Amino acid sequence: MSSEVIDIICHMDMKRIQSQLVLQCAPLIVGLKISNLFVTEPKSLRALRTILHESDLSFYVLSSTEDKVTCFVFREKSLDRYLQKKENQELLTEMGYNENMSLTQKMLMFRRRYRDYLEGRCDFPHEMGVFLEYPIEDVRGFIENEGRNCLYSGYWKVYEDVEAKKETFEMYEIAKETLVCLLAGGMSIVEIIETFCGRRKVA
């Protein structure tokens, strides 16, 4: 990341949802990913709903406390297709997800398991990696190695094809730099999202 962009980030108001979105969800916004986690303050949920209202992005609250809310931001149709891919569905089935579940049902189960984990009632829900579009070989590698012995660590822990994953991470960083510069240049977050995601089609 260039020194100029780092300087911009250092002077950004990290409590503003616009800043939080470009820093946490840039790969999703520009179309490189189909989902991202987004952590913000509970009072920012109304603003998030307004920002995403007419976009092609949706969000789902996974957990919430007095100080922090963790959201899953995603492209609904793309995520649904991705989770139905054979290798992804096989891993989800191993974790108790029925292949006939709708996306809504899968999201409900994922949220329940994630909250159970946060409250100490179960192990970490490794399907999170699938929902976040991490390569299945890396998700399985993480599970089999219990998070250890990775070949590289970036946006996730890498167990195969390191160079290809490094290129992907670099694209994610470029996306972040691009959106930071656009926001600093005067574009609103709504305009940025509309530029890259388009507007939601209403029947």
Image (cartoon, helix red, strand yellow):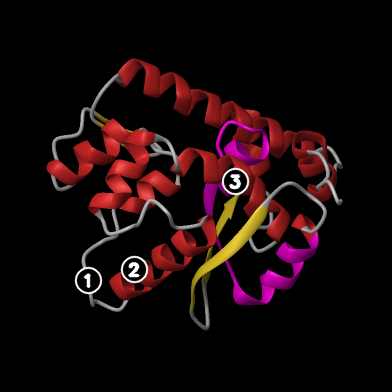
Location of residue 1 in the rendering, given as x and y in whole percent from the top left corner: 55, 28
Q: Is residue 1 visible?
A: no
User: Comparing marks 3 and 1, which lies closer to the viewer?
Assistant: 1
Region rendered in magenta: 23-50
**Residue drawn at point x = 65 percent, y = 51 percent:** 21
Task: Please provide percent x and percent y for residue 52.
Answer: 75, 56
- The local crowd at label 1, few if under 14, some if 14 to 19, many if 20 or more residues have their Cα within 10 Å, is few
Q: Is residue 46 above or below residue 141?
A: below
Q: Are marks 2 and 1 in contact (CB under 8 Å)?
A: yes
| Label 2 residue SS | helix
**Which residue is rendered at x = 50% and y = 57% of the image?**
102
Residue ID for mark 1: 122
Mark 1 residue type: Cys
The residue singled out by tag 2 in the image is 113
Left/right of residue 110 with respect to residue 31 in the rendered view: left
Q: Earlier in the sequence, mark 2 or mark 1?
A: 2
Please identify the quarter of the rendering in which residue 163 is found: top left
- Between 186 and 96, the one nearer to me in the picture: 96
Question: Which residue does the image show at 82% across and 53% down from the upper left?
Answer: 54
Which one is in front, 70 or 10?
70
Depth check: give the residue in front, 185 or 132.
132
Residue situated in front as seen by the camera: 168 or 9: 168
Please determine whether, in this image, residue 162 is positioned above or below residue 143: above
Q: Residues within 10 Å of mark 2 (few under 14, many from 20)?
A: many
How packed is label 3: few (under 14 Cα within 10 Å), some, or many (20 or more)?
Answer: many
Picture quadrant where residue 7 is located: top right
Residue identified by numbered label 3: 25
Whole-Å distance between the Cαs marked 2 and 1?
7 Å
Q: Indicate yes or no whether the magenta region holds residue 91.
A: no
Q: Amino acid at mark 3?
A: Cys
